[in-house]
Image: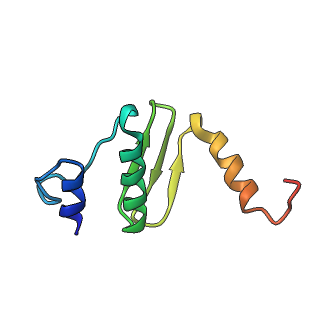
Amino acid sequence: MVNRWMEAFGDRRGIDDAPAMLATAESTDDGLSFVVFAMLFFWDCWVVHSDREFVMFSHDEWGAVGPGCSHLLDGIRKAYSDDPER
């Protein structure tokens, strides 16, 4: 299944030969697909904009947000808060 999914992006090597995928700013739709697929299968996934702006999801069910992306946490906290004023 994963090999077929990779073929849809033009990569025919398979997961054993190419255990990582790369998306650029010009291929944001592909990048979003990579992130969603990684999260569904609990794979490690890095989304990097710069050395200070990144988000990382781990196969161990935790994540990290670089200091340049800390504003993302505000939206997440608000969305999951019990206090609607937060």
Horizontally, residue 33 falls left or right of residue 77, namely left
Q: Residue at x 84, y 53 (%)?
A: 86
Say how many tags the image has.
0
66 over 26 or under it: above or below: below
Return the x and y of residue 81 as percentages of the image width and height: 77, 62
Horizontally, residue 83 falls left or right of residue 76, namely right
Image quadrant where one finds the N terminus: bottom left
The quarter of the displayed image where residue 51 is located? top left
Q: Residue at x 37, y 61 (%)?
A: 37
Q: Residue at x 51, y 32 (%)?
A: 52
Return the x and y of residue 33 as percentages of the image width and height: 38, 53
Q: Residue at x 47, y 66 (%)?
A: 61
Return the x and y of residue 76 as percentages of the image width and height: 67, 54
Return the x and y of residue 41 as percentages of the image width and height: 36, 68
In this view, the residue farthest toward the front is 8
The quarter of the displayed image where residue 78 is located? bottom right
Horizontally, residue 85 falls left or right of residue 77, namely right
